[in-house]
Amino acid sequence: MGSPRLRKQFETLFERYHSESASVQIDEIADFLCCTRRNTRMVLKKMSDEQWITWAPAVGRGKFSALTFLSTPEKLSVDLATRCLEEGKLDVALSVLDGNQDALLELIHKVLGVSHEKGKQIVKLPYYRQLHILTPSFAIRRSEQHLMQQIFNGLTQWNKKGDVEGDIAHHWEMLSPKHWRFYIRPSVSFHDGKGLTFEDIRDTFLALTPNYIFSHITDITSPSLNVIDFFLTKQDHHFDSKLAQFNAKIVPVSAHENHDYHRYPIGTGPYKVSENTEKKLVLIANENYFGYRPLIDSVEVWTLPDIAPIQLKVGLEVHEESEIPSVAYGEQVDVDRGCSYILFNRKTGIASDDNWLAYLTQTITPLLLLNELQNSHMNGIGLFNAYGLLPGLQHCLNKPNLGFIKPEKGSVVNLGYENEHPLYPLLGAIIEQRLAKDGIRLKIRQFDTLELLSTEKTKGIDIWLRGMSLGTQCPEALLSWLFAFNEIERVMPEDDFNVVSSLIEEWQLSPQRHFPVNEICRFLVDCGQVSPLFHGWMGISEDANNSIQNASCNGLGWFDFETVWIKPILK
């Protein structure tokens, strides 16, 4: 791209001759570039090598040489800024564009999206943080849970309608409510080429037995090749659906041997991780995938932390290299199957006091937060008031407001949330301002992923800002949120937690009983454990020719990479 000095010299040359081809003398150029004739020739040769100009030198003193411009200073700046973006140097790209953030955003929108490069279809997506923990047992955040579906497989999975279907297991049967048999696809291999073994499946599920959902697994055997038997201590008519949870993905026995496995996981899924740095995550199609090979060859998730996510909504327009067509967009939207919510520590925090709980739930309301967000740059992210934990549930409506005595001034409330989140700092500031009106001080702590999983490091928090997204129409997906990690159990009184567990056990005992999603969500709201805040719209911009096929995504751009394809635009 040439040195900064060379680009400056090009700007001077361009301004002097007003971008026109010219007949010039070498001595004239040497004078205004303040160079010797020898250095001037070197400068012109470098510019020619960079394909900024063509230079046809004349032979002899006093002769006129031919100078033709092939580029402009503006194009050089854009090219350099683009290269900086590709290298993750957002601050340098902004500096190259003279601090023009609008120009930077326009450039980001041109660079990202879906493109055809060297015969391959590549999706480039912006994201506001790094994605360095990509293993099922640590996927506590929603984006990582989504990526689990792309990198790993389970024995079963949920389809778009929410029905259980085969994944690594192609058939299964319940020999008894305590004995399930699964028939495994032959010749399934991991991304590193190693074949899937019985030991991989057995060790995966034995490691999950501390989890309530899988605590009734007592033994796992293989009576024949590609046949797996599960033996349970309790009757479970819905065990096949539980195996579709995101944390029940199969990982290799050798996973613990790789110290960098969190960042470079090895699964059996349609995509494998080829690069995961501070600058980008790159997933490439698994050529040996046992299912249909993905139609998108590569997915690049660029880390752009200094640009608000609401500004990074990139329509997935198709373009060839740098050629960006002008198209109109339609919008298909749906409601994300989840919500943002406040989780109260009713076990060891101030919310264990009924007066404090009543004060907090009636003071920190969705309408308060949404009204304040309207004045911020996040008001376009597609949030709306939640009346229940899931869209369609209305457990917050007509809920009686309990009387309370305003807490003593000078009291302290401890708020916790995950770091590198675009919305929570804004919500935290709004809550802090509101509580300050009552003389109450809010202390805010941010946690990384591993800290969120630590009971010891999180024990001092009174209220949490959290979010969940089921990602499917299957109501049993609520189990992952409730039990995959202990974040609900560790802040919920034991008697109340046992109520939820009893509802699950009653469901397991009957093949006809529907999953008690309504009863569980109502109980969590009624007892004050959870206060729903917002639902969000999810959608994807489509070009006028409808070339992006089979894609739906949420407000921050996620969609199922495996199923997306590009319809060619034919004349």
Image: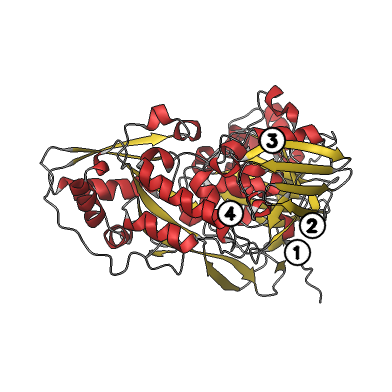
Q: Nearer the viewer, mark 4 or mark 3?
A: 4
Residue type for callout 3: Thr
Q: Which residue is depicted at the point 35% across and 57% down?
A: 525
The answer to whether 484 appears left or right of 257 in the picture is left
Q: Residue 508: which disc? A: 4
Q: Which residue is mark 1?
A: 566
- Of the two numbered discs 3 and 1 on the same chain, state the one appearing first in sequence: 3
Q: Is residue 30 visible?
A: yes
The answer to whether 392 appears left or right of 149 in the picture is left
Q: Which residue is depicted at the point 85% across and 36% down?
A: 195
Q: Which residue is mark 3?
A: 204
Residue type for callout 2: Leu
Above/below status of 410 relative to 435? above
- Of the two numbered discs 4 and 1 on the same chain, state the one appearing first in sequence: 4
Q: Quadrant of residue 321?
A: bottom right
Q: Which residue is mark 2?
A: 295
Is disc 1 surrounded by few (<14), some (14 to 19) or many (20+) residues within 10 Å? some
Q: How is the image coloured?
A: secondary structure
Q: Which residue is depicted at the point 78% across and 32% down?
A: 199
Q: Mark 2 and mark 1: span between their CA atoms? A: 8 Å
List the single residue furthest toward the bottom: 571
Q: Residue 253: x, y in percent?
A: 74, 29
Q: Mark 4 and mark 3: span between their CA atoms? A: 22 Å
Q: Nearer the viewer, residue 451 or 546?
A: 451
